Amino acid sequence: MAQEDIFKKLVAHCKEYGYVFQSSEIYDGLGAVYDYGQNGVELKNNIKKYWWDSMVLLHENVVGLDSAIFMHPTIWKASGHVDAFNDPLIDNKDSKKRYRADVLIEEALAKIEAKMDKEVAKAKKRFGDAFDEQQFRETNPRVLANQEKWDALHKRFADALNDNNLEELKQIIIDQGVACPISGSKNWTDVRQFNLMFSTEMGSTAEGASTIYLRPETAQGIFVNYLNVQKTGRMKLPFGIAQIGKAFRNEIVARQFIFRMREFEQMEMQFFVKPGTELDWFEKWKETRMKWHRALGFGDENYRFHQHEKLAHYANAAVDVEYKFPFGFKEVEGIHSRTDFDLSQHQEYSGKKIQYFDPEENRSYVPFVVETSIGVDRMFLQIMAASYCEEEVENNGKVDTRVVLKLPVPLAPIKLAVMPLVKKDGLPEIAREIIDGLKFDFNCQYDEKDSIGKRYRRQDAIGTPFCVTVDHQTKDDNTITIRHRDSMEQERIPIDALRSMISEKVSFKGLFEK
Ligand code: GAP
């Protein structure tokens, strides 16, 4: 099945099974804003816990914070967001559709990459186990010609971004023959910069009101609390502050479902270090974060690092963790070495000294910062895309399709569904008793409607890893059947053995130990 079709099915599945709804749907929706349903909110909370525990519980020098969304407007002047938090936009004159110029060029680069990957895949098929991919990429004339094209385009693109050369961005789009997917025409306007921050008024009277911004990143709330946390927590460098919270960006080109939203959530950690050590810490956090992603078991080959073409105004090194979505490799997380830019700017704009006294060196300085920044929603989409499977299974001698979400067990919204085989003979009561005994430990669901087969399918579709069936034998010997989502295998075990069997699998410990 084509990757776009899989993605469409995934979006429909998210709605049908209570994961994600379009915001304000009964009013025809609000662009690039989404709500999370009964299963979505559980998955989202589990993702946040996986991140929070890995950062705050497992690192004794990382502490948490929950700062306000509204902040003093000067913060955004100091951080550079008022002047430089822009996207380069271009309009197609025929369709009147607006695009991000950098994204159009990235797509042109991805097309060349796809051509090379196709050659590699063909050769791999032809040569089988003896295939040496590296050697093939270094010697095959078609791959080499495309690599040369890619390198030249990439350099031109990176130079244009770094020089903020908007005419050159437009020229690249023209030279690459990029056409609007709606009108099919190459009739483009000039490229213009567009600020992404939402603003609103704070205060009751027109004269007394001041313009404030909805934060476009949670990071600034951490920077402006650096002194508070360092002093009250008696923190010694290096140390980190972690925060999960909403961020807002007026994305003009909001596409691909919850990949790019106008209201979203971030999980950010700012790690404060001694100047000069930041690039070592940058490498350490790159490795730590990649391990965190890979521990979910979606295949190491589906993740890669992507070096930024253009460093943000605050960074001296930056990399993205990318995942292979159905629409290609895309950023899930950013890791940035932000130098002392933010703290120095806040020191200057606020007039307050923001420094660290280093007892070993007997001097004060502004710490440098390494940041890890990941979107909860984008991580959610990554997990859903990686978990969604359609499998052919046998059902009473016929081939049937089973849709199953193979979510990592600790992240699954419902861990255990308990089902009485029939709605009588005391079986529902036993099922309820099992739930009562386990509901403080795991999220359990009672399900008695429809045939057992249908109930299994319903639980597969929401990703429930374990289903327990209570039948007449249970009344005699206190045993139940437990059915495993991925293998569909069933085993008969005593009710008493359930807790220990499930506890081990749903715990985050298993992921952290990887
Ligand atoms: N503080 C640094 C920062 O905000 P970023 O690369 O702009 O860096 C970090 O954003 C992460 O936030 C991204 O990797 C992505 O996961 C998420 N993110 C950014 N914009 C988003 C949007 N419009 N919708 C959903 N997630 C977004």
Image (cartoon, grey):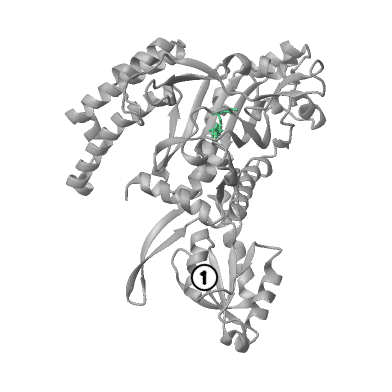
Kindly identify the residue that appears in the image at 32 percent across and 25 percent down. 179
In this view, 323 is above or below 203: below
**Residue 118 placement (x, y as % from top left):** 25, 38
In this view, 135 is above or below 126: above
Kindly identify the residue that appears in the image at 48 percent across and 71 percent down. 454
Q: Is residue 21 left or right of residue 399?
A: right
Question: Between residues 209 and 162, which one lies in front from this camera angle?
Answer: 209
Image quarter of residue 81: top right
Kindly identify the residue that appears in the image at 47 percent across and 48 percent down. 11
Question: Between residues 89 and 152, which one lies in front from this camera angle?
Answer: 89
- Residue identifier under label 1: 455
Image quarter of residue 506: bottom right
Q: Is residue 260 left or right of residue 190?
A: right
Image quarter of residue 48: top right
**Residue 85 placement (x, y as % from top left):** 57, 19
User: Tag 1's secondary structure?
Assistant: helix
In this view, 497 is above or below 148: below
Decide if residue 418 is in sight here. yes
**Residue 150 placement (x, y as % from top left):** 30, 23
**Residue 141 placement (x, y as % from top left):** 17, 28
Disc 1: CA contacts within 10 A as few (<14), some (14-19) or many (>=20): some
Q: Quadrant of ligand 1?
A: top right
Looking at the picture, which amino acid does disc 1 mark?
A: Arg
Decide if residue 340 is in sight here. no
